[in-house]
Image: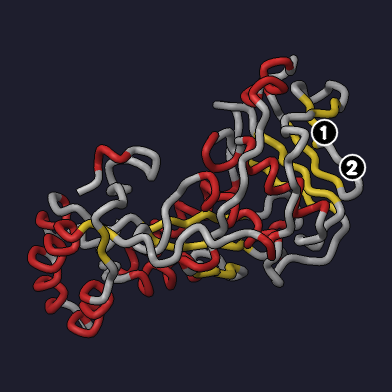
Amino acid sequence: MLPRMEMFKEAAFCRRLVALNHSFVPAGGSAPTKPVVANIWHEAIAGRTASEMATSMLAFLTNDALPEADKIPIWLDNCSYQNKNYLLFQAMQAAVENGDVPFNEVEFRYFVVGHSFMAAESYHSRIEAEFKKMEVVLNFRDFSAACRSADKNCVTNSLRYHQFLAFPDDRSSSLIGKSSTTISQICTAKFSQGFPRIMIKDMWRGLWKASQFLKRNADLVPLSALDQLREAPRGIGKRKKKDIQKTLLPLFLNFRYGERKQNFWNEIPTTTHSPDLAVTDDEDPSFVE
């Protein structure tokens, strides 16, 4: 959370800004030569709903830093709102089918829960080390610099509110109910151009099975036809911004360029309807100020 000022107890008791880093870290023997792509934003720009995480996934797949290939495998954890949900599956199926990503096939491979080490964990620990080198992280620009410095091949992609798309969710409850495999049992999912269904496995050594979870009238629209998820930045609560300005901004003057970095906080947008991501998520309206 920002600002990060561990030497001051005031920072520990003040609600701060949630910064998000949806990072894609290469694994395997060739990893040192491949780019780390870090999609970053903060809660005043956007949240972390399924549509926002799907937008970030597609921003990764269309990043110019990726090498050219026909197929790309992506290893993921089993986080439902981020990596394993029907909205994301529909978004991926549409993007591959419509040629919105430069791959003919995208495969999601899910780690075994509790038995896997993700390369992203190593990258995030290096970001933590960068934070400690910096001593303080006063604004989002400092956060971006730490993410970029944590890996020599890192490409940071700072997402703006207008880039987040409103993806349709045309899942069919009846089709899902009839399926012999629940979404939590899926260990790998494959999206292929020219094939109308996603292919799934529920066991690593099992056979591929075609999965149909969409309604008959579902439309796999291209990205260019989707609406923006937000017409303006998401914003943070007015009280939260005021607390940061009153409690933490005076402490910035103890550091180089601290006064200049106050500008980020004075200009941050506010709202009366977005939940505080420090205590909940975008789906829970009970935490709206």
The residue wearing badge 1 is: 199
* Horizontal side, residue 225 vs residue 105: left or right: left
Residue 247 is situated, as x and y percent measured from the top left of the image, at 9, 63
Residue at (28, 71) in percent of width and height: 268
Residue 234 is situated, as x and y percent measured from the top left of the image, at 37, 60
Residue 178 is situated, as x and y percent measured from the top left of the image, at 72, 15
Q: Tell me, for residue 116, which label it has, or none.
A: none
Q: Nearer the viewer, residue 241 or 1?
A: 241
- Up-down relation of residue 31 to residue 48 (above or below): below
The residue wearing badge 2 is: 195
Residue at (55, 26) in percent of width and height: 114
Q: Is residue 89 visible?
A: yes
- Up-down relation of residue 64 to residue 37 (above or below): below
User: Dot 2 lies on which element?
Assistant: loop
Tell me the amino acid under the disc marked 2: Phe
Q: Are marks 2 and 1 in contact (CB under 8 Å)?
A: yes
Residue 289 is situated, as x and y percent measured from the top left of the image, at 19, 49
Q: Nearer the viewer, residue 195 or 128?
A: 195
User: Dot 1 lies on which element?
Assistant: strand
Tell me the amino acid under the disc marked 1: Met
- Label 2 to label 1, Cα distance in Å? 9 Å
Residue at (85, 25) in percent of width and height: 209
Residue at (59, 37) in percent of width and height: 77
Q: Residues within 10 Å of mark 2 (few under 14, many from 20)?
A: few
Task: Tell me the colour scheme of the image.
Answer: secondary structure
Image quadrant containing the N terminus:
bottom left
Q: Nearer the viewer, residue 179 or 15?
A: 179
